[in-house]
Amino acid sequence: MMLLALQSPLGGAGDGTPAAADSSGTVVGVLMVLGLLVFMALVLRRVMNRRGPPPPGLGTTPRPLAPQTGVPVAAPSPPRPEAPKVTLPPSEAEAKKLAEAEALRRQAEETKAKLQGADEAEKARLRDELEAARKEAYRAEKAAEAEAKDRKKREREEAERLRAEEEAKAKAEAERVAAEAKAAARAKIDAEAGQTLAHGLSKTRTEGFMARLNSLFGGAPKAIDEKVLAELEEVLFTADIGVKTASNLVELAREKAKSKDLGADQLKGVIRKEVEKIVDLPRPKVLEGGGPPHVVMVVGVNGAGKTTTIGKLAAKSKLAGKKVLLGAGDTFRAAATEQLDVWAERAGVEIHKGTEGADPASVLFEAVKKGKEGGFDLVICDTAGRLHTKANLMEELKKVRRVIDKALPGAPHEVLLVLDSTNGQNAILQARQFHDAVALTGIALTKLDGTAKGGVIIGICDELKVPVLWAGVGEKVEDLRPFEPREFVAALFD
C-alpha cells in the first residue's frame, strides 16, 4: 500500500500532467512512511529487550526421544579429542625464499620510483627491469608458499603423532586400571571362595573309613597276607560305600594279592585307581544345553538341602549372565515356597509361585511356559519332598516330569537329586528309589563338611552309574562346588 501511495503522485509527470502542485504532498507522504518505519523498529526493539535472553536450550537441536518410552536418549560418547596445535619454525629453505621474495619486491618498488624522472629510452629499460623483478618476486613467493605448505603438513603429522602417543598412554593407563580392578575382584572372589573339596572331606579322611584304610596300609612295609585282607574287608564293609562296592574292592584286592611282589602300600594304590575309575563317570552339560530354556527338575527328600541347593545354583547362573526363573513346585510345604522366595530375591532372579496346596505339576507347567515365552535361559523346578507315602511321592514326581515335557518337549533336560551325605548308606538307597522313578541325570551331595561319610560318593557312582555333579562343603554360594573326580580322589588318598 505504501508503494502505491508513492507511485500515484510521481506518475503525473510521466503522462504529461503538471506535478509541481503535488510535490509538497509527495514529500509529506514519504516522510510519514519513513517515520512510521522508524517507530515500528523502536517498538520491536523494546519488546525484544523486555523478553530477556532466550531460555536454555532455545535454538539448540533437541535430544531425540527413545521410541515408546519418551525418555531422552543418552548423549553420544564424546568425540575423539582434537590434535594438539603444533607450530614449527620456518625451514631454512622457506626463510631463504621469503627473503628473496622480499628483496625482489623492494627492487621492483625502487625501479618503479626511478621511472618518474627517466627519459623515454631509460623508461623502456626500467619497465623491462620492473617486469622481470615482478616475475622473479612472484616465483619466489610461490616457492615460499610451497615450503610453507610442506611445513603445515609436517605440523599436522607431528600433531597426529602427539595425539596418538597421548591416546596410547591413556589406553595403557585404562588397561592398567582395569587389570588392577580385575585382580582385586579376583582376589575378593578367592577370599570368599569358601572351602575346597579337600576341606569338606577332611572328616572323611581323618575320621571315616579312609583313616582306617591309611592306618592299615601305613607304617613299615609289610606283605599281603590273609590277616591284612581280612582287616581290609572289615574296613570296607563297615564303610559307607555300600555292600556291592565293598565286595568288588575286596575281590580286586584278593586277586591282586596273588602276586607275591605286591606290598600293602602298592595295594592301596590299586584301590585308589579303582576308586578313580568308579567316580569318573561321563558328565552331562550342567545348567545349559537344552531348550531354551534349559529346564532342571530338582528332587530330594525334605531336609536334604534341596531348596538351598536350588538357590545357590540360581545365584551361580545369575552371576554367569543367565536369565533365571525358579518354579516353586513344592506346594505342600508353605515354608518351602517362602524359603525359595528368599533365595530368588537374594540371587536377583524371578520366581513363579502357585497358591498353597496347588497342584505341583500345574505350577511347574506354567513356570516352564513362562520361561519359554519370557526368553529365560534357565528354569529350575523345585518339587515336593514328602507326601503321605513313598509311593505317592514317586507317582507325583513321575507326573511332574510328564507335565514338564508337555510344556516343553524334551524337558526336563536335567533331573538332579539332592542328597544329604550324612545319611551314609541310606543316601544310596534314596538315590536308587529316585533313579527308578524319574531317571536321574546327576546328583548333588550336601553337608560333606559335617560328616565322615563322604565315601558314599563311591557307592552311589558304582551302583547307579549316575555322576555326582555338585558337592556342598559349606554355607556360602561358593561352597556348592562342581564335583571333580580327580580332586575327590586326591582329597581322600593324599
Image (tube, rainbow, N blue to C red):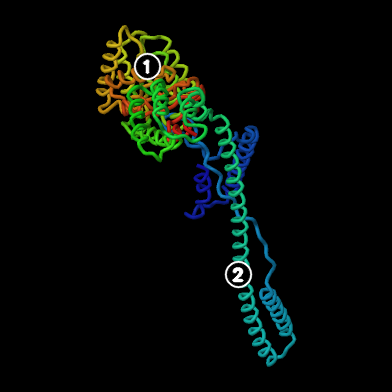
Q: Nearer the viewer, mark 2 or mark 1?
A: 1
Neighbourhood count class around disc 2 (C-alpha, 10 Å): few under 14, some 14–19, many 20 upward? some
Q: Is residue 23 rendered to the left or right of residue 438?
A: right
Residue 415 x, y percent position in the rendering: 33, 24
Residue hosting label 2: 150
Q: Residue at x 55, y 40 (%)?
A: 60
Residue 282 x, y percent position in the rendering: 33, 35
Q: Is residue 235 rendered to the left or right of residue 102?
A: left
Q: Sequence-wise, which precedes: disc 2 or disc 1?
A: 2
Residue 323 x, y percent position in the rendering: 41, 29
Location of residue 103 by image quarter: bottom right
Q: Amino acid at mark 1?
A: Asn
Location of residue 394 by image quarter: top left
Secondary structure beneath dot 2 equals helix
Q: Which mark is residue 404?
A: none
Q: Amino acid at mark 2?
A: Asp
Q: Residue at x 59, y 66 (%)?
A: 153
Secondary structure beneath dot 1 equals helix
**Is residue 269 in sight in this rendering?**
yes
Residue hosting label 1: 426
